[in-house]
Amino acid sequence: MTPTDTPHGPLVDAHAQLAEAIEHLGADDGTHRLLATSRREMAVSVPLRRDDGTTAVYEGFRVQHNFSRGPAKGGLRYSTHVDFDEVRALAMWMTWKCALVNLPYGGAKGGVAIEPLDHSTAELERVTRRYTSEILPIIGPEIDIPAPDIGTDEQTMAWIMDTYSASVGHTVPGVVTGKPISLGGSLGRATATSRGVAHIALKAMALRGIDPEGATAAVQGFGKVGRGAARFLADAGVRVQAVSDVGGAVWAEQGLDIQRLGDHVDQTGSVDGFEGGGPVGGAEQIDPASIVTLDVDVLVPAAVESVITVDNAERVQAKIIVEGANGPTTAGADAILADSDVLIVPDILANAGGVIVSYFEWAQANQAYQWTEREVKDRLEERLTAAWHDVVEYAEAHSMSYRQAATALAVRRVIEAHELRGLYP
Ligand code: GLU
């Protein structure tokens, strides 16, 4: 049968991955149903008084997929693409991600269907505070701990922390992670996801016998994840030949000067129009859609889900795909790539650096004690390396893809916790 992406969507893919893991583990139907369903879901409407005095109303969601291993954990996304099913899928993936890297958390995700770029800072503050007050009964440092995701940042987390703290009557730094450092944020959190992506990319290159010095990469997305990943890869000697974002894409044979590209993005808001320069020479504008099919050693999709699909999977030329984004490869594309030599390092491993340092931030908030940046970096690499070895060994032992191995390991850990706790009543 030809792999297909219809019916399409991240939740369909997440369910298919879970079903495969359940079958492999020989778990029963009841357990399957339990894990296929979110433990708690909340849909809220978020009214906003706009700066011009009119009222807008946005849909908001918070989904807590699982609590078996601890409080639910996961980001908050502001994007017009947000819908209930997307948030459900992302929450389920958070459960697997946290279990895979052995964090004492379940999984959650939140979203508001809003385009942040179309709103002033004051409007974003009002939306964030109103959304927080709507979901307030179901969040807390021992219940569910939000963090940044697409369209949100440390300022968003500061507003959530303040709104929550005002409501309970005292300052609660552990209610969110990804906070500004001056409010108890962890050193190293801002770059944690991208540091982890690069760390895992280098492991995958070593496994495939690719010397980073002179290897080539393409990075899709130049935001919280892609920008740092490009920088860390370039620091390791990789020629990052192409980078794209929503505004465009640029390419340079000798590799882009990531520092200069960053400066250009800070000035103009996009990689579009970057002309290169410096020791590595000029850059060309390319079609952003072509980024996933470029002839490079490593492809890092670090933007949104469902970008490697049945329509382009056969044209992927990269030897390694390191999933910086959540869910960038559809199940249909995964099936096509399974027949190729492309090594896919799945999102729940590749981008777990962010939630790992979120956990460190939460632990520091609970201890009221700040770790040094060195401690954070070392412990991040230690956890990621352990998870990497777990996945590689499991995949080899069971002749599975890394995604199948990572999901099976994670699902097994969640089932173990669930069985030890038993069902109440
Ligand atoms: N949004 C990030 C993710 O998808 C981080 C979540 C967190 O730190 O809780 O992994």
Image (tube, rainbow, N blue to C red):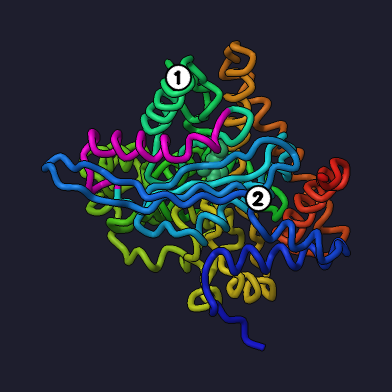
Q: Which residues are magenta?
A: 116-140
User: For the residue with label 1, is its CB less than 8 Å from the closest atom of ligand 1?
Assistant: no
Residue 122 forms part of the magenta stretch: yes
- Residue 88 in percent (x, y) is at 56, 56
Nearer the N terminus, badge 1 or badge 2?
Answer: 2
The question of residue 173 being in magenta is answered with: no
Q: Quadrant of the C terminus?
A: top right
Magenta-highlighted stretch: main secondary structure? helix
Q: Label 1 belongs to which residue?
A: 181
Q: Is residue 232 above or below residue 322?
A: above
Residue drawn at the location 55% of the way across and 64% of the way down: 10
Question: Looking at numbered disc 1 in the image, what kind of residue is underneath it?
Answer: Ile
Alpha-carbon span between mark 1 and mark 2: 32 Å
Which percent across, then down, holds residue 54? 15, 47
Q: Which of the pair 207/226 is nearer the observer?
A: 226
Q: Residues within 10 Å of mark 2 (few under 14, many from 20)?
A: some
Circle number at residue 39: 2
Q: What element does badge 2 sit on?
A: loop
Total tally of numbered discs in the picture: 2
Q: Residues within 10 Å of mark 1 (few under 14, many from 20)?
A: some
Where disc 1 sits, the SS reads helix
Residue 5, above or below 119: below
